[in-house]
Amino acid sequence: MTPDPLGGNPSAPGGGPHGPDPLDHSDPRRAAGAAAAERLLRAYVRETGTEVPAAGQSLHLVLPLSRMTLRVPVRYRSATGWHRFGEVRVVTSERGGSLPADIALAAAGLVREHALRRDRSLLEGGDAVARVLDSARRTAVHLARRRAEAPGTAGPTPFLDAEQALLLGHPLHPAPKSRGEASDAELDSYSPELRGSFPLHWFAAHPDAVVGESADGRPVADLLRSLAAGVEVPAGTVPVPAHPWQAREAVRRPETAALLEAGLLRPLGPAGPAWYPTSSLRTVHRPDAEAMLKLSLGMRITNSRRNNLRGELRLGVRAARLLAAGSPDRPGPGGWLRAEHPEFGILRDFAWVSVGRGEGSPEAGPETGLETAVRDNPFRGTGGVSGSGGGAGEALCVAGLLAERTGPGDGSPPPYRSALCEAVERAARAHGVSTAEASERWLLRYLDVLAVPLIRLHAHHGIALEPHHQNTLVALGADGLPVAGRYRDSQGYYVAASRAAALERLVPGLYEEVELVFEDSFVDERVAYYLGISNLLGLVGAFGSFGLAREERLLRVLRGALERLRAAEPGAKGLLELLLDAPTLRCKANFLTCVDGLDELVGDVHTQSVYTDLPNPLAEAQR
């Protein structure tokens, strides 16, 4: 692997000049604590604008309100925020004396400092600390379980194996594996990291109590019956699925309890074949099923309770109708996308279902907790990409592809730090080039099959998405390079106000009862975050952090590709000028959102999360 320009490759055997990698510690609790501290620190320094010194030096975090100073060795300094850190220590004397600081002490100090600075309740800060510790504890369980597996153990399909790969969680979130309110026994079945699976909990609903819609007008009752294999459904009723954990909670809601009491809803219990949770936990997959299901799940995961809201579900169906609109001679957005970029596709949330007795339209009424979105499932059997223009390949969640691995448990590093490392090494061998050159080719192919289609869809039709790593998938060819891309999750759709009228003419009633149209500048800002910072800069950071290539070189490659696209696509000028030339970019602040106790799925889209300004590495990159 290419040595890191800032002081060795922290992912190399032995850890380079910095000693053994803390992620590979033989005690899974110590390895999990190191991973938790690294994620906490990455988020903290990004959101507070704290300068990180070069590799081999120490980061000093002075916390005056808590009368504490933390000292952390820097193993790798990243231009995009994917820093690597060593053991956190608390300074005990002016002469530099220090003691080890575990994740509990580090989290308490950092969270308390910023709760006080932001005039937040220390009770909220205590809740944030509790989530950090819960995340670390659950990560330790993930590592212990995976280390106990036989070598070569994998998920049922390549698609599911990638969904099950996020053992350590989001690299820039302080509590990525926090799952409050669920017991360890429940999470054995519900966690993708533990290779869980479970039968769905089914209800039998009177047809008059079933609400929902589909993009093509197919009755949702027919769709549900096709998915309820192995479930004994009473005659004259409709099967309605639920996550087992959610089923217990939903029946306590007044709206659901009233349906049960009236005899319009009847619990059938767990039934049918097992479904597998994907990386989001609430979306479940069965390799032989015609669709995936995005179930409502009120469990608090990271910052939010993942209850499906009916407005979001309606949005998915509207988006599916929009993608299907048009004719062969005058294609709409979906037809244009297929013609221009056959290697890219969008997984539609094309139907939804729930139960209720709302007045007026059949979708009216409050959520009952049994809301479910129905999603395309092109990943059947082997996990290949059905109908991809680039040929057969593995469908990989990008977050799973980049997910850091720890060693096998004896203190040594893993053969590859991530699936990305394996893919790049395969590309280097196939093409007879260096790992650094293979990394550049990988990045450019990734842009072609994923980022360029998304940017051009926005430029030509004013439709923007939220393509962070967990919402995007790539298929890899035999040489390890990307051959096809996919986007999923209709919760994140935006229509630029300047294009709203044209799209509504294509799909009358497109905006009724959904929040979809936003000012062009706001849409550009969000795409710059989700696609620019979270996805593309995050990918560059992963290459650098894993020792595959120099971030500075990859930033120049990325900038050059985006400049060429700007010259070719006038409609993308606003977005690309923001990405390429703005000195700062608006960035979601996961640490501050956690400290403030916000639920990112509740409230106005402008204020659901804390955003902060981040120096723009692309503006600093020289071509």
Image (cartoon, helix red, strand yellow):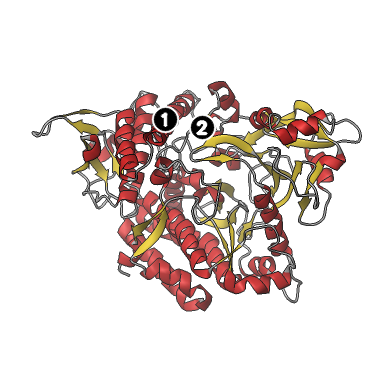
Of the pair 240 and 434, the residue shown nearer to us: 240
Pointer 1: residues within 10 angstroms few (<14), some, or many (20+)? some
The residue drawn where x is 8% and y is 33% is 95
Count up the numbered dots: 2
In-image side of 320 versus 75 (left or right): right
Is 427 situated above or below 202? below
If you read the primary sequence from the N terminus, does the residue marked by circle 2 or circle 1 appear first? 1
* Residue 179: assigned label: 2
| Picture layout, residue 210 above or below residue 618 | above
Q: Is residue 546 visible?
A: no
Marks 2 and 1, Cα distance to the nearest angstrom?
Answer: 11 Å
| Residue 277 placement: quadrant | top right
Check disc 1 and give the amino acid type: Ala
Q: Which residue is mark 1?
A: 130
From the viewer's perspective, tell me whether residue 567 is left or right of residue 256: left
What percent of the width, then of the height, locates residue 409? 38, 25
Q: Residue at x 34, y 45 (%)?
A: 118
Q: Which residue is at a point 57% across and 25% down the rendered structure image?
A: 188
Task: Please tell me the numbered disc located at residue 300.
Answer: none
